[in-house]
Image: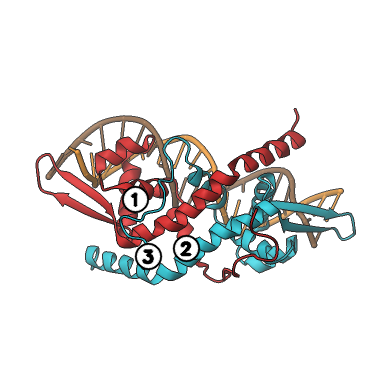
Chain colours: A red, B cyan, C brown, D orange
DNA sequence: CAGCATCCGGGTGGATACTG
DNA sequence: CAGTATCCACCCGGATGCTG
């Protein structure tokens, strides 16, 4: 393993408006990460995302895309064709976000079993009924 | 900057139980990150966390600590003294989580202005009333 | 001190129906 | 196709009061 008690990164600086929490407020919701990662692969149109994500309502897809666009992470391009077509694409800023997300993903993959085990152990110890 | 459209990390693997979202479900809530980072500095007791965090109710502190403990990220040590004293400490697993959190924090610090600007620009363009 | 129990309001997100 | 508009259920989290 890597991080020990002593080589812990930096201090993170929080308490009184914490930047990490700020990101999580934007991306910690139910769908943002999924969308960002999908758009990280390639441009998608609305219906593609809707089908790809499975489980998302078009309401939530709309709202999430709007929020991401608002924050400059995604661009929305509408073509005045018929039927209409709207493409969503990561901005440069949005693509930089893929880096921390990837790190988080790697952590998750590396430790998901560990967490599951801890949880089951804990639950079994607490509520054996 | 670094990440371009082509050197995008790995594929992240999602759709159908996505590990990233799994982490965010555990740590994307309002207080977990704050607590983890504080405990990353040193062991804290309940009341210390309560004071340090400012704004958290003891209900939420309790619930969040319990969830973190359940997932094996934090250990809880109670001393049968009077008055009672309970120490919370990051586990080894919990400390490894500091790494992705730090990366996320650095991203946040590097781009918070950018995001703020994008948002204001967007809002000004949409609702100038 | 370190909680637990209870009540309760607001926001998140799902389902459904309708439109340019 | 790509949304918008409504209604509504749930649950997260705050406030308060009580205990070992």
Circles 2 and 1: CB atoms closer than 8 Å: no
Question: Image quadrant for the C terminus of chain A?
Answer: top right
x, y (%) of residue B42? 72, 65
Gap between marks 2 and 1, in whole Å? 21 Å
Quadrant of residue B117 within the rendered picture: bottom left
Q: Which residue position holds label 2?
A: A22
Q: Chain of mark 1?
A: A
In the rendered image, residues at marks 3 and 1 fall on the same chain: no
Q: Is residue A103 above or below residue A60?
A: below
Closer to the chain start, of discs 2 and 1, is 2
**Residue plotted at (51% across, 64% down):** B105
* Tally of numbered tags: 3
Q: Residue furthest top?
A: A129
**Residue plotted at (28% across, 65% down):** B123
Q: Which residue position holds label 3?
A: B2
Left/right placement of residue B91 relative to residue C13 reads right
Left/right placement of residue A105 relative to residue A3 reads left
Q: Chain of mark 3?
A: B
**Residue plotted at (30% across, 53% down):** A66
x, y (%) of residue A87? 22, 48
Quadrant of residue A113 within the rendered picture: top right
Q: Mark 3 or 1, which is nearer the eye?
A: 3
Q: Chain of mark 2?
A: A
Q: Nearer the viewer, residue A3 or A90?
A: A3
Q: Nearer the viewer, residue B54 or D5?
A: B54
Gap between marks 3 and 1, in whole Å? 15 Å
Q: Which residue position holds label 1?
A: A40
Left/right placement of residue A44 relative to residue B100 reads left
Crowd rating for badge 3 (residues with CA inside 10 Å; few <14, some 14–19, many 20+): few
Gap between marks 3 and 2, in whole Å? 22 Å
Q: Mark 2 or 1, which is nearer the eye?
A: 1
């Amino acid at each position: 393993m890597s991080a020990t008690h002593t080589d812990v990164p930096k201090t993170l600086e929080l308490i009184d408006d914490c930047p990490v929490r700020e990101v999580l407020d934007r991306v910690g919701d139910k769908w943002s990460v999924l969308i960002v990662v999908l758009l990280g692969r390639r441009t998608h149109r609305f219906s593609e995302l809707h089908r790809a994500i499975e489980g998302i309502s078009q309401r939530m897809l709309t709202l999430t895309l709007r929020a991401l666009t608002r924050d400059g992470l995604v661009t929305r391009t509408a073509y005045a064709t018929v039927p209409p077509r709207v493409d969503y694409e990561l901005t440069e800023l949005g693509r930089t976000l893929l880096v921390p997300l990837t790190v988080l993903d790697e952590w998750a993959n590396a430790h998901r079993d560990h967490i599951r085990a801890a949880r089951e152990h804990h639950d079994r110890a607490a509520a054996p009924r």
